[in-house]
Amino acid sequence: MKCLLCKSDTMNDDKTTYFAQLKNCYIIIENVPCKKCEQCGEVVYSASVLEKIDEILDKVESIASKTFIMDYSSAA
């Protein structure tokens, strides 16, 4: 896979932290699987990971107060 930003061919499997700002809170999801460019650090998520993140955000938004931090693997 080519990096969308710098066009490098070095996209490696990795994990990252996903940040989201919703209406009433901030949500941080740690250890999210991704492809990360070795050259520029650009992060790309698969469609299945993005679907799971959407599910997590929907669930957490209703219970979070200001900041909510969770691990992707415990929610996936």
Image: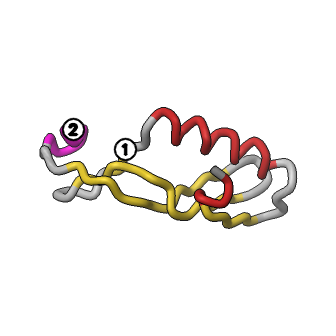
Residue at 84%, 62% (x, y): give it.
65
N-term-proximal mark, 1 vs 2: 2
Q: Position of residue 72 (x, y in %)?
A: 59, 57
Q: Residues within 10 Å of mark 1 (few under 14, many from 20)?
A: some
- Please state if 67 lies on the left or on the right of 33 as rendered: right
Q: Left of 8 or right of it: where is 12?
A: right
Residue 47 lies in the magenta stretch: no
* Residue type (three-letter) at the residue carrying disc 2: Met
Compared with 44, 70 (above or below) is below
Asked if labels 2 and 1 touch by Cβ distance under 8 angstroms, the answer is yes
Q: Position of residue 62 (x, y in %)?
A: 85, 48
Circle on res. 1: 2
| Residue 22 x %, y % | 70, 48
**Which tag is nearer the camera, tag 1 or tag 2?**
2
Indicate yes or no whether the magenta region holds residue 4.
yes
Q: Which mark is residue 70?
A: none
Q: Amino acid at mark 1?
A: Val
| Residue at 66% over, 60% down | 74
The numbered disc on residue 44 is 1
The residue positioned 69% from the left and 47% from the top of the image is: 56
For the point 82% across and 59% down, the residue is 64
Please state which of residues 61 and 25 is positioned toward the viewer in this rendering.
61
In the rendered image, residue 23, in percent from the top left (x then y), is placed at 76, 47
Is 43 or 48 nearer to us in this picture?
48
Distance from Cα at disc 1 to Cα at disc 2:
10 Å
Q: Residues within 10 Å of mark 2 (few under 14, many from 20)?
A: few
> In the image, which residues are magenta?
1-7
75 with respect to 40 (left or right): right
Disc 2 secondary structure class: loop
Query: Considering the numbered disc 1 on the image, is that residue within a helix, a strand or a loop?
Result: strand
